[in-house]
Amino acid sequence: MVRVTDDKEVKEAVLAGLQRNKEKYGKRYCPCSLVRNDDTVCMCKEFREEGMCHCQLYVKTKDESIQG
């Protein structure tokens, strides 16, 4: 399960950076990365493949409703 961080400061800063990049470059590139390519469009390749959001905007958690 993926959720947005509870840290208000992180959330506001990252979302503002994503919006700036969308306005400037036309895509929501990760504001924590100097590289702008398809791998760094939010949700970035690093998060999709490794489950780690460098910006700390997204957090992967275990889905507690699934038992097994």
Image (cartoon, rainbow, N blue to C red):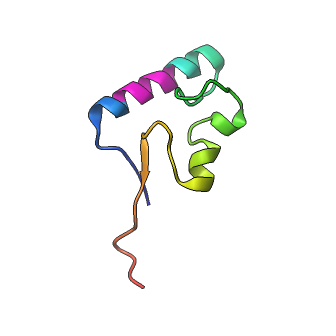
Q: At x 57% / y 37%, what residue is drawn?
A: 42
Q: Give the mark count.
A: 0
Q: Measuring from the top left, give residue 7's x and y in whole percent.
A: 29, 38
- Seen at 64% across and 18% down, the residue is 25
Location of residue 12 (image quadrant) = top left
* In magenta stretch: residue 68: no
Left or right: where does residue 20 sit relative to residue 40?
A: left
**With respect to residue 20, does 60 lie above or below?**
below
Among all residues in the image, which is located at the extreme bottom?
68
Q: Quadrant of residue 50?
A: bottom right
Residue 16 location, quadrant: top left
Residue 17 lies, in percent from the top left, at 48, 23
Q: Main secondary structure of the magenta part?
A: helix
Residue drawn 42% across the image and 85% down it: 68
State which region is magenta: 12-19
Q: Residue furthest right?
A: 37
Task: Tell me if residue 23 comes above or below residue 35 in the rendering.
Answer: above
Give the residue at the far top of this rendering: 24
Image location of residue 27, percent across then percent down: 62, 27
- Please state which of residues 24 and 30 is positioned toward the viewer in this rendering: 30
Of the 4 image quadrants, the one containing the N terminus is: bottom left
Residue name at image x 40 percent, y 60 percent: 61
The one nearer the camera, 61 or 25, is 61
Q: Give the camera-side residue of 13 and 33.
A: 33
Q: Is residue 52 left or right of residue 59?
A: right
Instruction: Report x, y in % for residue 51.
Output: 53, 54
54 to 21, vertically: above or below:
below
